[in-house]
Amino acid sequence: MADNPMREIRLEKLVINIGIGSNDQLLTNTKLLITKLTGRNAVQTTAKKRDPSLNIRKGQVIGAMVTLRKAEAADMLKRALDANNNTIKERSINDNSLSFGIKEYIDFSGVKYDPKIGMLGMNINANFSRVGRRVERRRRLRSVEDVDHKQVKKEEIIAYITKHFGAKVTTE
């Protein structure tokens, strides 16, 4: 019996985030780095609440991020996994998502250290969904999606990244 094509998993989006705190000079460097890595312009992220110990107030710019979709997301996830030695810790995977960090941007192949940027790390977040997810999000003829169809289980994500990206999942 053939598998149901509507149960197929796909990479919905990839978000690259660099948090820098309250330093304004680092903000321009992070935007430059994200543009250098992805070819896209970064968006500023702001603080949702104040934290006096870190000298951060609500609404202050504290980082930069970019969201990639479709083929760009898959290419960047492949590069990010290569920078992470093609290994992911099992605790980095939740239902519908995969999150991991890269300590230094020079871990990416083909990227050299730039003294103007300095040394920065980043967070990589990948969201997964099934075919047919649009049914619940569209404006016209919206319908409720089944709970089993909405959730992409941890085991399915592990199988997907192993098959499509050749990554290994370790327990620790």
Image: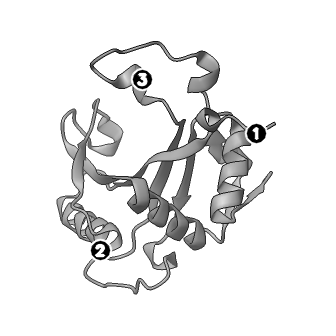
Amino acid at pointer 2? Lys
Q: What's the distance in space between the residues labelled 3 and 1, CA to CA? A: 23 Å
Q: Residue 78, which numbered label?
A: none
**Picture quarter containing residue 122?**
bottom left
Task: Tell which of 85 and 39 is nearer to you.
Answer: 39
Mark 1 in CB contact with mark 2 (< 8 angstroms):
no
The residue tagged 1 is: 2
SS label for mark 3 = helix
Earlier-in-chain disc, 1 versus 2: 1
Q: Position of residue 44 (x, y in %)?
A: 21, 49
Q: Residues within 10 Å of mark 3 (few under 14, many from 20)?
A: some
Which residue is identified by label 2?
36
Against 78, residue 155 (above or below) is: above
Place of residue 169 in the rendered image (x, y in percent of width and height, measured from the top left): 75, 56
For disc 3, the marked residue is 135
Q: Is residue 88 visible?
A: no
- Image depth: mark 2 or mark 3 in front: 3
Marks 2 and 3, how far apart at CA: 36 Å
User: Which residue is drawn at the image coordinates 22% and 32% (left, top)?
Assistant: 58
Amino acid type, callout 3: Val
